[in-house]
Image (cartoon, coloured by chain):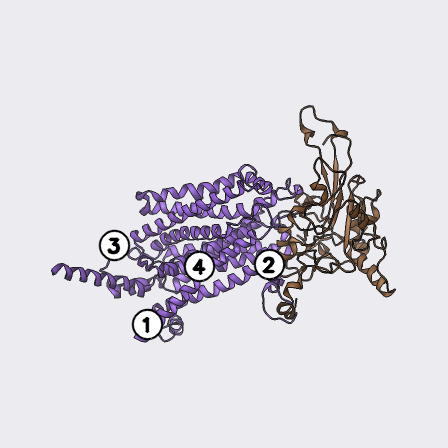
Amino acid sequence: MKDINEDIAWAKINQDVLKSLENPRKLYWVIVLSALAVFSVGVGCEVYQYNVGMGVANLNNPHVWGLYIATFIFWIGMSHSGTLLSAILHLMHADWRKPIYRFAEAMTTFSLMTAGLFVMVHIGRLWQFYYSLPYPNERGLWPNFQSPLLWDAMAIFTYLSSSILFLYVGMIPDLAIARDNIHEGWRKKLYSALALGWEGTDRQWRNFRVTYLTIACFLIPLAVSVHSIVASDFAMSQQPGWHVTSFPPYFVAGALYSGCAAIITLFIILRYVFRFEEYMTLPILKKTVRLTFAISMVWTYLNAVEFASVWYSHDEASKAVLIQKATGPYAPFWWGMIFCGSVVPLVLAIKRFQTSIPVLFVVSLLLNLGMWLERWMIVAPTFSHGYYPWTWDHDQWPSLVQWGMVLGSFGWFTLLFMIFCKVFPSVSMYEVKEMVYHRKLHSKKSESQGAH
Amino acid sequence: MSVTNLLENWSQFRHFHPVDDKPHDPYKWAMSIDLDACTGCNACSVACYAENNIPVVGKERFSHGQQMHWIRIERYWDEDQNAVGGRDFPDQGAQFLPMMCQQCEAAPCETVCPVAATNHTSDGLNSQVYNRCIGSRYCSANCPFKVRYFNWYDYPSDDAWPAEMSQQLNPDVTVRGKGVMEKCTFCIQRVNEAKVKAKSEGRLVRDGEIQTACQQVCPTSAISFGNLVDTESRVHKQWEAQKVELDKDKQEKDEQEGGSKLRGYRILEELRPYPSVMYLERVRESAV
């Protein structure tokens, strides 16, 4: 089965994709308004916490980190799939990525923005946030370059700015199409400005290709390093359960995993909301599912490596944390993580389910639930069973303020994503055309070969 | 840290390891706590609250674990207290351990702070700069002893010191607002006062000139505090007698087989934070 029907006319591609920019359907408004409502809950929680103090999050003195950090890692992880699809698969000439990479890239940008919010809500003095940014300043003070948190700040800013650039550059030919096909109005002005006078000349295409490839090559090591640095926040510390050498690759695998699962979720949603059935086809979904399955097994393997290395390390404290995770108060969540992260993906191995949309929708949500639990299970249990016995009898449960903000972040992400899909073409028109064109060339070639 | 630091002497900016050419010349503040003398009366904790303007958070917040006690008395019991035929109340081998910031020489909290709000001073203290702190709480996450306390609420405006009570605040100590980390300072205000006085008289601080608040109130004199560099100081003599050395992660006591007569040890030494507080083991007649 072909990835995409090769008989689609180029004009129809333009028409179909540009239609997604106009006249929102009712379903679209439902999603946007509910996202806005959920986001306002998060904003309310933050305003309350800002005014009263961090204590309302019900964090306490040994348990100084909670859901904010866990959800921060979750969103950073989510951002990796966009780079995987657009940059890594671009270099590997995997053509099936073309109709779906645009929204994956948008997902990268928006999940990074969401992750950034969690750094803000986590710190005790938000109004002094700029202290942690490395820039020459009148205070004559620099941040501490030894701290993994500072590396975080720098890595995330770099990654965010590069992925916005990548998203934008890849969109220029499409913006020109939109400019030429849309009625007068603010959109026309916006697209004209953003298309940078694109005319589709030979020289422009050549420069465009080189630029795109360069940014893609730049972005790949960046993506890997960003999540390795987030892993360093834990691996560089001395705490049992965090001080694990295999954390950076483990985090990167986890990131790609949750990102791919999120792509499946959004694929299905977009396919229905914008009627992209012809572009986001089942064979493409199937390839994404297979990729997700492969990554889930890598993640499972790395998880096993972590447990084994802790178990055989003879480090009593780390071992105690592992046992605590499996049997202590966090056990339901820890086993939930193992179930959602390692058992549920086995469904994806069954061929029948690889194209079954309802099954995939549920599975992809479960996978992401598992990955969220994973991040929480990395952060929280270490605090309740650290080196020092005084911490062992301290329990902590996140307050509704924390849960509200976690929920709010999903609203914020959905809101940004839905607005993006209405303002910018979420399927890459020019690359879908390439797919159709290439196919035609190939089929003509084989016909002529067959004749001789 | 300035740009000059960054470019020229980055490696010397922090003391990584206590074995430098000239460690802490002429002061290195250290403590020793005799657990045999400690009765667990909590006077040290109360004195610390009074001296350092620590907010009393109230019952509810305390039960949420949001307490601020810079020095806490930990209770430990013998392992067999719950066993069948175990010992009854007075003989359960109750043991107390006063725990405060260990002023580590290679402090895990210092390296991880994103804004360098916690630093090492030249006299061997682990300082906390409240104005610089942004409240990321990474220091506490990486502290093996969990002796750092975060201001979860704005206590000054939260009625921690209602009306006349605010008159009893110590004018030498900052009152901290919400969102900053704090911890035991070894009564830095007393240390600095004595240092300034000694300097104006052209001498070094004498042993016993500085008393920390906890030391001052301890009814059994379990706590001693002083300058480890000064060979005549009580702390130095205690450390020397116990053969505990600041820059080692395994002391002679641990190396002797079949139990040692030495009593001095430092908590979690094997993690190599090089703590500045030495504890003297309890001498006990009961089992364990």
Q: Colour of chain B?
A: brown
Residue B273 location in percent, x, y?
67, 51
User: To which residue does mark 4 refer?
Assistant: A108
Which kind of residue does numbered mark 1 sit on?
A: Trp
Residue at label 1?
A: A205
**The quadrant where residue A443 appears:** bottom left
Q: Nearer the viewer, residue A212 or A186?
A: A212
For label 3, the residue is A2
Residue B22 circle label = none
Same chain for mark 3 and mark 2? The answer is yes
Drawing shade for chain A: purple
Q: Secondary structure at mark 3?
A: loop
Of the numbered discs 4 and 1, the one sitting upstream in the chain is: 4
Identify residue for label 2: A147
In space, the residues marked 4 and 1 are separated at their CA atoms by: 25 Å
The percent position of residue B3, horizontal first and vertical second, equals: 63, 70
Amino acid at the residue labelled 2: Ser
Of marks 1 and 2, the one in the foreground: 2
Would you say A297 lies left or right of B36 here?
Answer: left
